[in-house]
Image (cartoon, rainbow, N blue to C red):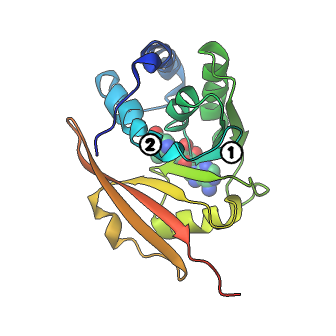
Amino acid sequence: MEPRLPAALNAPLGRFLVLLDRWNRTHALTALPPGERREELLLDAAILLPFLEALPPGARVADLGTGMGCPAIVLALARPDLEILAVDASTKKLAFVRQAALELPVPNLKAVHGRLEELPPLGADLGTAKALGALGQLAGWWGRHGKAGSPFLALKGPEWAQEPLPAGWLATPHPYGLPTRGQRVVVELRQAAQPS
Ligand SMILES: C[S@@+](CC[C@H](N)C(=O)[O-])C[C@H]1O[C@@H](n2cnc3c(N)ncnc32)[C@H](O)[C@@H]1O
């Protein structure tokens, strides 16, 4: 698999990078050099787009630990018919996400502030996360915020298989590559059906 950003997203994502650069000068949102941001933050997020195809209009996607809105921003621009929740505990980073949603504009991108272990359940149909935590911790958070049986997609490096999973969870790897940043994996997590 190889991520592809739809051409229609070039203009709004260009505005996103300009805004990020401006905010980063005073708010220290990311340590990534400007020349690496498009591939690491935006192209990488595009690997998730095929997984959204099965979602009907109005479905809710929760990007846990979104930081400055990644991968949420790409998902929200590509699928304006979905509700994309950008969830994070950082007030500063979510202020940036709100501003980006306003300026680009991306009306279906909603900033949700709070700690994952404290927020009321989000009832999401699909979950995503990048650089948030080990698979066991992600599964715990998804058990709280995802609808029963719904998938969770974790963007991981090749060492993902060393992260233990809690009993009752299944992990399916979907490997892919980035042009200059090497091999990555989308790890699809699901809770096995409970015996009735
Ligand atoms: C390394 S950053 C990754 C940001 C973004 N996903 C990316 O790939 O650029 C991890 C983010 O998760 C957030 N975070 C960590 N633990 C959290 C928790 N328990 N509840 C909510 N957010 C959390 C942090 O505030 C931080 O913005």
Looking at marks 1 and 2 on the same chain, the residue that comes earlier in the sequence is marked by 2
Total residue callouts: 2
Q: Is residue 89 in view?
A: no
> Which residue occupies 20% across, 36% down?
180
Tell me, for residue 50, which label it has, or none. 2
Q: Marks 1 and 2, Cα distance to the nearest angstrom?
A: 16 Å
Q: Nearer the viewer, residue 43 or 193?
A: 193
The image shows residue 60, relative to residue 185, as above or below, that is above
Q: Amino acid at mark 1?
A: Arg
173 left or right of 152 in image: left
Q: Which residue is mark 1?
A: 60
Pointer 2: residues within 10 angstroms few (<14), some, or many (20+)? few
- Residue 7 pos. (x, y %): 39, 18
The image shows residue 124, relative to residue 144, as above or below, that is above
**Residue ID at (59%, 33%):** 93
Instruction: Tell which residue pokes out farthest to the right in this image.
Output: 120
State the residue in front, 28 or 156. 156
Mark 1–mark 2 contact, CB under 8 Å? Answer: no
Q: Is residue 146 left or right of residue 34?
A: right
Residue 15, above or below 138? above
Identity of the residue drawn at 61% across and 61% down: 150
